Image: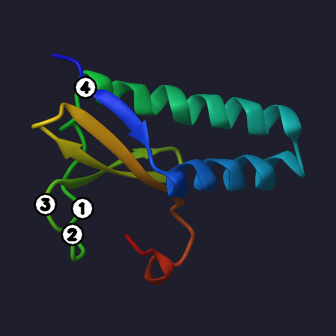
Amino acid sequence: MDYKVIWSDAAMEDLQDIWSFIAERDPDAAVRIGRSIIKHIGILVSFPFIGPAYPRGAKGSLREIVFRSYRIFYDVSEASLTVEILHIWHGARDESLFAM
């Protein structure tokens, strides 16, 4: 059975920040990257457990998948058949700034 993907406000803000940063230099690239990230997240509809559990202080079902240089953090709820996208984080950013 397929899961429903839900975006947190923080994840939507992350995607907007990524798009804005890239668009300053190359608007076409920003559109391509944004669409590609969204398409990549689409795999979670059918395969929500494809990403490994996030090991650093994570609680419960927090997981992560990677798209290019971006780490996509999400939470799976088997009870409600949902995948909540929590954050999209560029791999070069300082992980100590990351708060879940």
Q: Which mark is residue 22?
A: none
Q: Residue at x 24, y 61 (%)?
A: 54
Q: Which residue is mark 4?
A: 3
From this viewpoint, which residue is outermost toward the bottom?
96
Q: Position of residue 73 (x, y in %)?
A: 37, 54
Q: Nearer the viewer, mark 2 or mark 4?
A: 4
Q: Is residue 33 left or right of residue 40?
A: right
Cα separation between marks 2 and 1: 6 Å
Q: Which residue is mark 3?
A: 60
Cα separation between marks 3 and 4: 18 Å
The answer to whether 65 is drawn above or below residue 4 in the figure is below
Marks 1/4 in contact by CB < 8 Å: the verdict is no
Assign a secondary structure to mark 4. Answer: loop
Cα separation between marks 2 and 4: 22 Å
Assign a secondary structure to mark 2. Answer: loop
Cα separation between marks 1 and 4: 20 Å
| Label 3: few (<14), some (14–19) or many (≥20) C-alpha neighbours in 10 Å | few
Q: Which residue is mark 2?
A: 58
Amino acid beneath label 3: Gly
